[in-house]
């Protein structure tokens, strides 16, 4: 992790909501260190996408943070919003 550079659960939630306007999202910092998060997203944008494609949609939103080490892990659960 880069010192002085952290991403909060609120920032992760905001980025996902910006990308997937119809989504319901919950983000939990699982370790208290702002680099491991549990992410749950429900969206109609997942329609006709495999689970891998759904997860990739979320992971791609944080590619620069993964590269920098600012975010180390996202545990993702995706659901199709009804």
Image (spheres, helix red, strand yellow):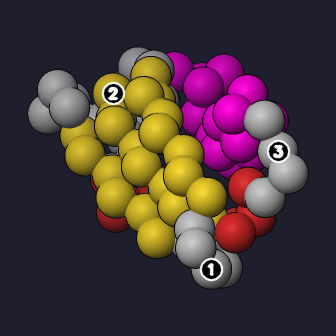
Q: Which badge, 1 or 3, comes first in the chain's sequence?
A: 1
Q: Position of residue 26 (x, y in %)?
A: 34, 58
Q: Nearer the viewer, residue 81 or 20?
A: 81
Q: Position of residue 73 (x, y in %)?
A: 44, 22
For disc 2, the marked residue is 36
Is 24 left or right of 55, judged from the image as shown?
left
Is label 1 or label 2 in front?
Answer: 1
Q: Is residue 34 above or below residue 45?
A: above
For disc 1, the marked residue is 22
- Which region of the structure is painted magenta? 51-69
Is label 2 or label 3 in front?
Answer: 3
- Quarter of the image for residue 16 reads bottom right
Residue at point 34%, 37% (across, down): 38
Residue 49 included in the magenta stretch of the image: no
Q: CA distance from mark 1 to mark 2?
A: 25 Å
Q: Is residue 50 above or below residue 40?
A: above
Is 68 left or right of 11, judged from the image as shown?
right
């Amino acid at each position: 992790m880069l010192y002085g550079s952290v991403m909060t659960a609120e920032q992760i939630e905001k980025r996902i909501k910006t990308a997937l306007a119809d989504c319901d999202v919950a983000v939990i910092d699982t370790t208290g260190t702002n680099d491991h998060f549990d992410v749950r997203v429900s969206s109609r944008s997942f329609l006709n996408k495999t689970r891998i494609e759904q997860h990739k949609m979320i992971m791609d939103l944080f590619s620069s943070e993964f590269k920098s080490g600012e975010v180390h892990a996202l545990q993702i659960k995706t659901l199709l919003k009804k």
